[in-house]
């Protein structure tokens, strides 16, 4: 994609998130976004069908950034990224971009971000369970929903309370809680 197009899209999305910090989604207009991004209304419509499409693409963009930060390659090609490493990268990334993710997670008008985050975590927990197994007698579907909901709830609590613990500490606690319900092998535990 052309660098000018990427730069314009980035400006529009950043303007949109900035407006979300200040007001509810329903109150934001395309004119507000265009003014903040310093582009014409028509430019926004070249890239997005409407503000709902912009919201969807904004959510996808920021979830993709979070996922990329989480899943960067291991420092050594032979060593796989551990669950702890991936979680630590994600929480550190959230610390660095706290304002944006706080806005996306806590705004009442945009529950779609939390819902899509939950979907990603359900997939991640399911993959982990397929690789490591679960405790005997536990139902897979119930365990997946429980662990994903708990992780999203913990992340949401951490962000909404201004990150009262450093990323390393919150991840250590989360790993300990996951170990209670998953059979994480020592190479995956971190």
Image (cartoon, grey):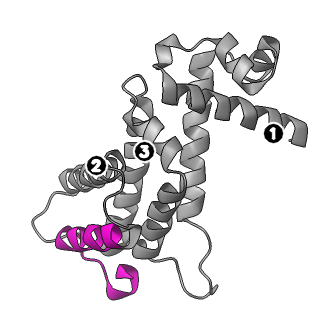
Task: Classify mark 1: helix, strand or loop.
Answer: helix
Indicate left or right for 187 with 136 as reference. right
**Looking at the image, which residue is at 42% across and 44% down?**
117
Which is nearer the eye, 28 or 184?
A: 28
Give the label, 3 or 1, closer to the camera.
1
In magenta segment, residue 145: no
The quarter of the picture where the C terminus appears is bottom left
Q: Which mark is residue 157?
A: 2
Asked whether 133 or 30 is in front, the reply is 30
Give SS at disc 3: helix
Mark sitting earlier along the chain (3/2): 3
Q: Residues within 10 Å of mark 1 (few under 14, many from 20)?
A: few
Residue on which disc 3 sits: 117
Magenta stretch: includes residue 177? yes
* Prevailing secondary structure class for the magenta stretch in the rendered image: helix
Where residue 177 appears, as percent x and y from the top left, is 21, 68
Label 1, on which residue? 6
Q: Nearer the viewer, mark 3 or mark 2?
A: 2
The residue sitting at 21% across, 52% down in the picture is 146
Q: Residue at x 59, y 49 (%)?
A: 64
Q: How many marks?
A: 3
Q: Locate residue 15: give its quadrant.
A: top right
Q: How busy is the neighbourhood of tag 2: few (under 14 within 10 Å), some, or many (20 plus)?
A: some
Q: Which region of the structure is painted magenta?
A: 169-190
């Amino acid at each position: 994609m052309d660098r000018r197009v990427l730069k314009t899209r980035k400006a529009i999305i950043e303007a949109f998130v900035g407006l979300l910090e200040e007001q509810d989604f329903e109150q934001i207009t395309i004119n507000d976004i265009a003014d903040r991004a310093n582009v014409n209304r028509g430019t926004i419509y070249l890239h997005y069908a409407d503000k709902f499409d912009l919201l969807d693409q904004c959510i996808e963009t920021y979830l993709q950034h979070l996922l990329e930060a989480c899943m960067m390659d291991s420092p050594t090609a032979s060593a796989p990224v551990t669950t702890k490493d991936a979680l630590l990268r994600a929480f550190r990334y959230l610390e660095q971009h706290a304002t944006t993710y706080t806005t996306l997670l806590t705004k009442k008008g945009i529950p779609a971000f939390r819902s899509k985050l939950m979907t990603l975590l359900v997939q991640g927990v399911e993959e982990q369970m397929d690789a490591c197994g679960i405790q005997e007698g536990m139902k897979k579907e119930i365990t997946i929903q429980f662990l994903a909901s708990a992780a999203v709830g913990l992340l949401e609590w951490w962000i909404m309370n201004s990150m009262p613990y450093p990323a390393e500490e919150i991840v250590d606690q989360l790993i300990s809680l996951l170990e209670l319900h998953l059979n994480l092998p020592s190479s995956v535990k971190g």
